[in-house]
Image (spheres, grey):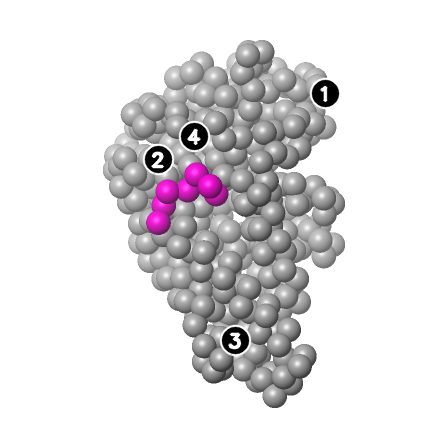
Amino acid sequence: MPEWAWWVLPTLYCGYIAAHGVGLWQLRRRQVVPTPTPVLPSLSLIVPVRNEGAHLRAHAERWLGQVYPEFTVTVVDDHSSDGAAAGLPPDARLRVLALPHDRVGKKAALAHGIAHTHGAWVVTTDGDCYPLNTDWLGTLAGGMCPETVCLVGPLRKRHRGNLFEAAQALESVGLVGLAAGAIGLGAPTLANGANLAFRRTAFDQVAGYAGIDHLASGDDELLVHKLAGAFGGRAVRFVFHPQAIVETPAEQSLPALVRQRLRWVSKGRAYRNPFMRLGQVVAYLAYAVLLLYTLRVAWAPETWPWALGLWALKLLTELSVLYPTARLLGQRYLLWWLPLYQLPYLVYVLYIGVAGSFTRSYDWKDRRVQ
C-alpha cells in the first residue's frame, strides 16, 4: 500500500476536528452569552443523587450560594443506601424528594424533580458537582433569550496534581471543546447533564425523556438531540464563559474510569445525529490506522518520518479545539502533557469503543444497570 493511503482516514479525522475548531471560533466570535431578557426567568435546579452523602452538604451550600434572584433547588434521592440527602442545610429554597419505589435511574429522578417544580427553565447538575462561581445561574440566564431552548455549559474535571487525574482532565477539555464546536456549527452532539439548562415548555413539547428512557444513560446528549431535532440546532447554545463552569471530580482508579466510560459509550447505540455517527466511525478507524502505522515503524524504520508527520498533523489539528477550551477552563498547563498521552489515549479510546459496543450491563453507584 502506498504511503499516502495511510493518510486518508487520519486526514478525514483531522478535517472533522478542524470543523469543530471552526465552530468553536464562530461561537466565540458571536459572543455566545447574549444579552439577557429584561425579566429574568425563574429557575428550577434539579439534582438527582445516589449515594452522594460524602459531599452533598458542601455542594448544596454552593448551589444555594448563587446570587440569582429566583431559583429553587430540588434534590431527588434515587434510593440511596448511605442516607445521601440527610443533613442538608435548612433553606426555604431547598427541598428533597424521594424517588418512588417503582421508579429507578437518573432519568426517572430528573423527570420526578421536573414534575414537582415550576421554574420556567430547568437547570440540571449532579450531586458530586458544584459551580465555581456564585453567578453560575446568572451567567446561564444570560443565554436564555427567546430563540433559545437549551443551554450547554462547560464542565471542568478537577485535577489535584497526579498524572491519572491530569489525563482525565485533558480528555474532559477535549470533550467540552467538541461539544462547543459542534454547537457553534449548529449541529449539537455532546453535552453533560452536570451543566445543562432547558426551557420547560420545550421539554414538555418533545415529551421529555420519552423514547430514550429505556437507556440508563443519555439524559443529557439524547435530550439535546431531541430538542435540536424539534427546534433546530441554532436553538441550542453553548455558554462559553468562565463564570458558567461547573467542576466534577476525577475517577480515582482505572476500573472506576473504565466503568464510567463504558456507561457513557453505551448510549451511543441510540445516536441518530448523522454528524455524530460519522465522526465516531471516522475517529475509530483513524485511530486504528494510526496505531497500525505506528507499530509498522518497528519493521519498516524508514517510514518513521511519515509516522511522525501523521502524529504532528493530528496534534496540531486537535490544538485548534483544545487550546481555546483549556484557556476557558483555566487548564492550559495540561496541554504540556498532550504529547505524552497521545499513544496511550489512542489505545484507550479503541478499547472503550470496542468494549462499549458489546456492553449491555455495568455497575453504577452500587447498582447493576442492564
Q: Are marks 1 and 2 in contact (CB under 8 Å)?
A: no
Among the 4 quarters of the image, the one containing residue 102: top right
User: What residue is disc 4 on?
Assistant: 212
Disc with the residue nearer the chain's start (4 vs 1): 1
Q: Are marks 4 and 2 in contact (CB under 8 Å)?
A: yes
Above or below residue 284? Residue 44 is: above
User: What residue is disc 3 on?
Assistant: 310
Residue 226's label in the rendered image is 2
Image quarter of the C terminus: top right
User: Foreground mark, 1 or 2?
Assistant: 2
Which amino acid type corresponds to the residue marked 4 in the rendered image?
Ile
- Can residue 240 be seen from the camera position used here? no
* Gap in angstroms between the C-alphas marked 1 and 2: 34 Å
Magenta-highlighted residues: 268-274
Whether the magenta-drawn stretch holds residue 271 is answered as yes
- Who's the residue at 37% across and 42% down the image? 272
**Element type where label 4 sits in the image:** loop
- Who's the residue at 36% across and 57% down the image? 23
Disc with the residue nearer the chain's start (1 vs 2): 1
Which amino acid type corresponds to the residue marked 1 in the rendered image?
Asp
Above or below residue 38? Residue 103 is: above
Residue 82's label in the rendered image is 1
Whether the magenta-drawn stretch holds residue 44 is answered as no
Q: How many residues crowd mark 1 within 10 Å: few (<14), some (14–19), many (20+)?
A: few
Q: How many residues crowd mark 2 within 10 Å: few (<14), some (14–19), many (20+)?
A: many
Disc with the residue nearer the chain's start (3 vs 2): 2
- Who's the residue at 40% across and 58% down the image? 20
